[in-house]
Amino acid sequence: MRKRKLVWGIVLGIFLSFIFVIEAHAIPTFARKYRTSCTTCHIGFNKVNAFGEAFRLNGYNVPEGDAAYVKEEPISLGAPAWAKVWPEAVWPGVIPQTVPISFMAHQRVNFQQDDETSTLDFNMPHEFELLLGGTFGDFASFFGEYVLDENGDVEGLQRLFVQFNDVFYSNFGNFLPENALNLKMGRFHIAAEPFHNPTRRTLSSILMNDSTVGESAWNFRDLQSGIEVNGIMASRLRYAFGIVNGNGATLDDNHRKDMYYRIAYKLDGLALDGTGGEESGDELKQRNNWVDDSVTLGTFGYLGTSNISDADDNILWKNNQFFRVGGDLRISYANMDAYSALVYGEDSKPLIDLARDVKSLAWLIGADYVIFPWLTTSLRYETTEVWGGQSDTERFISSLALFPRANIRCIAELIYYPESDGNDDGNNLLMVDLAYLF
């Protein structure tokens, strides 16, 4: 008993020491470009606010006109007059004035408890990664992520994609409304992923995004290589359709392509294209921008074929055809952001020794609350159920996030698995994580 109290005391002491960490001296790429705080787009990183989501969907350009807010002028690649004589000249472009690279580092402490033992682990560094992002004017944007160190291993390139914005508006004639059609190419998180993992509040990823069925390795969270068409119609309706390799592969490993879709509509609040907000003058709004009284309804689906492999990545079965379909709901009011999602799926043969369909169901409900601009809390319940011999999983996630500075974050998070019949009881885990961007 005394040993357990000592361990908890150490963890609490580490958490309190993180609170008084000194301010980092550099700021991330987009903050440098606009000379603004991370809080302009984030409710404390990584979670984006309504403006940050509009900024992302608009190809990392400020909605309703980017030029007035840029404080770090880009370098012109040719005189603007060249555009008037195209195609007799190369269309002029721009590149960022400084190298568009930021860094993020994690230091983490894990306290894990099971029925017999308790483990305290100093996971430092937990992760160190390079983040790059920028624009080629308003025509195209890019984003990339390279993980140098995660749990002691070099992970390498994660995301890297380019998006061509407003393909048939302005650049090549106004054939479609503004924001109606963008083209994304590369390796990215698919739009069908419920509550996009990189922008969540908690350290732990969403269970339904991580979940696999049987011996199939496919899940929503996997990065995919392919092409996505997306856009916004009438300011509030967002759509996305994509075709990808599947199985998270950069090279096609099953000679079939997977497809997915997402459609969402936002009621009230800041529109998806950034319209309908307050006038911000010459400076971007940095305070109280987590308030976005709105309701967003969405539906998503994925149709694909996955491979079944052994521990040595030898492919044992190539024809597990499956689909996932679901919906999500998000309600934001004052300081509260509540969300829920449900996904149903069927796999034709996810088990080598069982040639029959396997059905699955997953759902979640959760909420984030802003106590102060520098202090937020989260609570989430999530569960998955698979009919076909696989154990069910349910868990609670509770976290408290502290932001001593705009680019420094400390989260204390508890993952709790209730003891119930049929539940795949995981080990309860307390994590304390310090992350900083520069």
Image: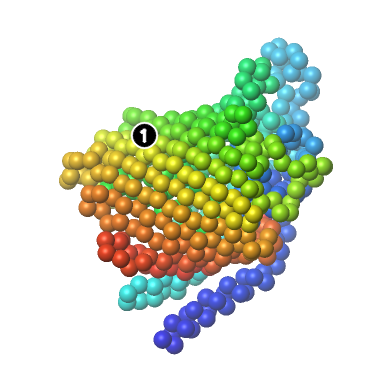
Left or right position of 269 against 324: right
Going by the picture, which residue comes out furthest to the right? 282
Q: Quadrant of residue 165?
A: top right
* Rendered-image quadrant of the N terminus: bottom left
At x 78%, y 43%, the residue is 280
Q: Residues within 10 Å of mark 1 (few under 14, many from 20)?
A: some
At x 66%, y 41%, the residue is 270
- Give the total number of marks visible in the rendering: 1
At x 63%, y 17%, the residue is 175
Coloration of the structure image = rainbow
* Rendered-image quadrant of the C terminus: bottom right
Which one is nearer the viewer's eye here, 410 or 57?
A: 57
Left or right position of 173 against 184: right
At x 73%, y 54%, the residue is 287
- In the displayed structure, 301 sits above or below 284; it is above
Q: Position of residue 253 (x, y in %)?
A: 34, 35
Q: Position of residue 241 (x, y in %)?
A: 48, 30
Which one is nearer the viewer's eye here, 149 or 406?
A: 406
- In the displayed structure, 116 sits above or below 372; it is below
Left or right position of 90 against 121: right
Q: Quadrant of residue 73?
A: top right
- In the displayed structure, 356 sits above or below 287; it is above
Q: Amino acid at mark 1?
A: Leu
Which secondary structure lies at badge 1?
strand
Left or right position of 12 against 82: left
* Whether residue 251 is visible: no
